[in-house]
Image (cartoon, rainbow, N blue to C red):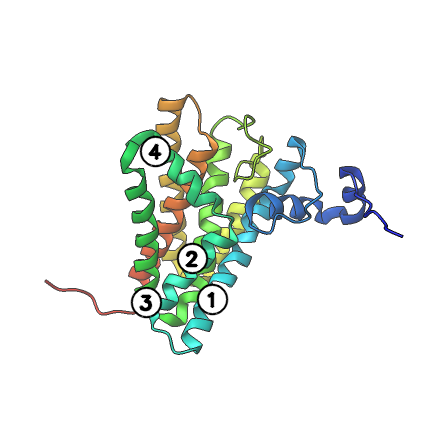
Amino acid sequence: MRYRRRTMDRDEWMRRLGPLFPAAVAIRRTTAARLPRALDVAAEDLPRSAPWMVGLGVVTGFLGYTAAWLVAHWGGSPLLAAAFAIAVLALCGGAVVESGFARWAEARAGRGAMIASVAALLVRFAALASIAPGHWLAALVIAEVAARWSALLLQRLGDPILDDALRPGLSVGEVSWGAVGAVTLAVAIAAAWGFGGRGVATLLACGVAAFALGLEAQRRDGQPTSDALAAAASVGAAIALVAIALIVPGLPAWNP
C-alpha cells in the first residue's frame, strides 16, 4: 500500500517552528539549502527574517573556512585553500550574491559584466590568500556578515523592494530601523572583537559603499533593486576582506 507524504501549509510550519520560523525563511531564501522545501514564503514573513539573514553569514563563513581547512589539512597550498573557500561561500549562498551582482553589472557595463563578476571574485580570493591563516575564520565570518549587513542597510535606506520579494534574494521588504539598529550593533561588536577599531572602520566603509550604490540605483532605476542589494553585498565582502588583509597581512608587503 502506497502512502502519500502529507504536505504542511504555511500556518502549520509556523506552529511547528515557532520563533524559528523566520530562520527557516532566511535559510530558504538566502542559501543553497532551500529548506524546508515545502515552505511557502509570504511577503509579510520577510521583515522578521532580516536578522537571521545576516546571522546566516556566520554559518556560511564557517563553512567556507571548513573547506579551506580541509584543503590545507590534505596538503593544499594557501592559494588552493582560498580558492576553495571562496567557491564554497558562493555555493552555500546559492550564488544569490554572485548572480545578482552579474545582472547589476550587465545593466551598467553590458558585455563587461562578466569581467566585473570575475574581478569581484578574484579580489576576494586574492585578499583572503593575503590574510594571515590564523585569522581566516574571523575574516570569512566577518566578511560574510558584513556583506549581508550591507544589503540589509541598503534595503532600509531605500524604498521597500516588493516586486521580487518572493524570489530567492537578499530583499526583506519593509524592515524597521529597530531591527537594522540591533543587527548593526551585533555586527559592530563582532568586527571589534575580531579586529578592534579597524574592524569597526571596515564595517563603516562597507556601509558607505552600500549608501553610494543606493544613490546610484536611485538615480538610475528610481530605487534600489534586488540586484543592487546583491552588488552591495559583493562589494561589502570584497571591502571587508581587503581591509582585513591590510590589518593582518600574511604576506610581506610589496615594495617596488
Do labels 1 and 3 touch, CB within 8 Å? Answer: no
* 3D distance between C-alphas at marks 2 and 3: 12 Å
Q: What residue appears at the point 17 percent right and 64 percent down from the top-left corner?
A: 254
Residue neighbourhood size for the residue with mark 3, other residues' Cα within 10 Å, grouped as few (<14), some (14–19), many (≥20): some
Q: Residue furthest front?
A: 1
- Under circle 2, the secondary element is helix
User: What amino acid type should be assigned to the residue bearing mark 2?
Assistant: Ala
Height in image: 69 above or below 32? below
* 3D distance between C-alphas at marks 2 and 4: 22 Å
- Under circle 4, the secondary element is helix
Do labels 2 and 1 touch, CB within 8 Å? Answer: yes
Which mark sits nearer the N-terminus, 4 or 3?
3
**Picture coordinates of residue 148, whole percent (x, y):** 49, 46
Residue neighbourhood size for the residue with mark 1, other residues' Cα within 10 Å, grouped as few (<14), some (14–19), many (≥20): many
User: What amino acid type should be assigned to the residue bearing mark 3?
Assistant: Leu
* 3D distance between C-alphas at marks 4 and 3: 29 Å
Which mark sits nearer the N-terminus, 2 or 4?
2
* 3D distance between C-alphas at marks 1 and 3: 13 Å
Quadrant in the picture for residue 160: top right
Q: What residue appears at the point 52 percent right and 57 percent down from the top-left corner?
A: 60
- Under circle 3, the secondary element is helix
Height in image: 63 above or below 37? below
The image's mark for residue 106 is 4
Height in image: 45 above or below 138? above
Residue at the spot of label 2:
87
Which mark sits nearer the N-terminus, 1 or 4?
1
Residue at the spot of label 3:
79
Q: Residue furthest top?
A: 222
**Picture coordinates of residue 187, whole percent (x, y):** 50, 52
Q: Residue furthest left?
A: 256
Residue at the spot of label 1:
67
